[in-house]
Amino acid sequence: MANPCAIIGIGQTKHDTKREDCSQIDLVREAAKRALEDAGLTWRDIDAVVIGKAPDTFEGVMMPELFLADALGAVGKPMLRVHTAGSVGGSTALVAASLIQAGVHDRVLTVAYEKQSESDAMWALAMKIPFSPPLVAGAGGYFAPHIRKYIAQSKAPDDIGIKVAVKDRLNGVKNPYAHLHLPNITYEEVRDSLMLWDPIRYLETCPSSDGACAMVLASESASNAPTRPAWVHGGAMRSEPTMFAGRDEVNPIAGQECARDVYKQAGISDPRKEFDAAEIYVPFSWFEAMWMENLHFAPIGDGWKMTDTGATAIDGDMPINPSGGVMCSNPIGASGMLRFAEAAMQVRGQAGEHQIDGARLALGHAYGGGSQYYAMWVVGSEKP
Amino acid sequence: MSEDVTGIVVPIHLDYTYTPGVAASRFLRHIAEGNYVGQRCPKCKKVYVPPRGSCPTCGVPTDEEVELKQTGTITAFCIVNIPFAGQAVECPYVSATIQLDGADIGFYHLIQEIPYDQIHIGMRVEAVWKPREEWGTTTESIAHFKPTDA
Ligand SMILES: [Zn+2]
């Protein structure tokens, strides 16, 4: 049985298109200092640092964790970098949690970030594969066919993606750290926005952001903090090959199994009923409907109905992404940790205007690569 | 008065030598002759094209070569309207995953010779090759796929 792991400090930056006011160093420190402050700790109190970010081509700096070690107070301490593409923010938090759960350390600082403005992620994700035509236009070009397949299989009305996009942007208005603040967004505006990768429209797409997120994780004996901690009730990661015969890209097995594992650890049998909130990785709005099925919140083919009936709204029975989610801020490497952190903020009662009243149990979810990496945690207000 | 330098833009390049490996090399040499040749897994019998020399599901080597037809089915697609650095095809274009008859996995290629709003998942397509003198060890030897007449 693993030792309990508490989340005692959470910090994030203001996310924006270009944080030209700061370097990568300033960006990670902005989030880390807020997490330390929230935990009532100083750099000195930290035993180890676990950092994560997406591919180095996103900034054009090789192995940035080396030059960030100093800025994150890791000199003379263990420092690890985690890399699992877009899910990295989640898996980074899970690696940090495992150091607590294994009894190796008492206080671990975990940080994830991306400064997309320093390079070109679209270019970085559209690298020419030798001996084949360069057809896949970035992440949108990769995921759009999967979305089209989902729409065809589920017979969903073709405006579900529009409804998610509006909902998440209105949630984001309640989140002061969100990159996009679009209080006047309308259904018509999303519907009439440019079709980038048909069936994905411009406003059904996440922004490209600079931002960072940090958390201080602690053992039971080190869990005293100014704000009551959140507790890890379960954590799981899964992966699968990007390509194999018979692969279901719409509802990948790795995601289904990762969810089953993390629910089992947390003793959850009916996720839609038992979770008070979920922060899931939705980079293109249609993924809300797809992940509702993959995460066993809805039967196969019915995920879109949760959006359509308003169940996933902030005042619905299963609020999804009350923070505005990835649709409002996508500093890729940090996006997964933001989901994990926002879930923890909900059960700590720290989410401010986007707080779900009395939230006690929440899910944080991240995925990455070609829907091939998954990281999830369940956090609760009570010690498990 | 000089202004503070807060950032500079520098180009980055990535030059590399790519070794496709035994299975992909055989596939590409077949392509240069106008043939699509995949490999069958001895255990699950799935046919991979392009082949990778092993089955990702069973973890066993795949040796048996299987010549495939040049007709197949669109399993998914999107219409790309967004230009990006390094783009080789003019927008809008249709990027589709096509599963050739006799294969168990799809690959990406272009769909042309049909209005884009008439393309659908499940549509039957066939390969349209470039002129013989332009064939080489690349799937770009195929210009695009088009709907079958049948
Ligand atoms: Zn096999």
Image (cartoon, coloured by chain):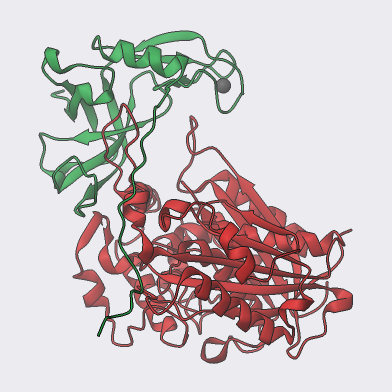
Please tell me whether residue A145 is drawn above or below residue A284 in the rendered image.
above
Chain that the image shows in green: B
Task: Please state, as top left, top right, bottom left or bottom right, where the N terminus of chain A lies in the image.
Answer: bottom right
Front residue of this view, candidates A274 and B30:
B30
**Residue A18: percent from left, percent from top:** 35, 73
Front residue of this view, candidates A118 and A248:
A118
Chain that the image shows in red: A
Residue drawn at x 66%, y 52% as measured from the top left? A237
Task: Please state, as top left, top right, bottom left or bottom right, where the C terminus of chain A lies in the image.
Answer: bottom right
Please tell me whether residue A358 is drawn above or below residue B29 in the rendered image.
below
Residue drawn at x 56%, y 75% as measured from the top left? A318
**Residue A116: percent from left, percent from top:** 40, 64
Front residue of this view, candidates A374 and A149:
A374
* Residue A362 visible in image: yes
The answer to whether A44 appears left or right of A166 in the picture is: right
The answer to whether A47 appears left or right of A150 in the picture is: right
Residue drawn at x 12%, y 13% as measured from the top left? B133
How many numbered discs?
0
Please tell me whether residue A200 is drawn above or below residue A32 in the rendered image.
above
**Residue A188: percent from left, percent from top:** 22, 76
Most distant residue in the front direction: B1
Quarter of the image for residue B75 reads top left
Residue drawn at x 51%, y 80% as measured from the top left? A316
The answer to whether B18 appears left or right of A269 in the picture is: left
Quarter of the image for residue B9 reads bottom left
Quarter of the image for residue B70 reads top left
**Residue A352: percent from left, percent from top:** 56, 91
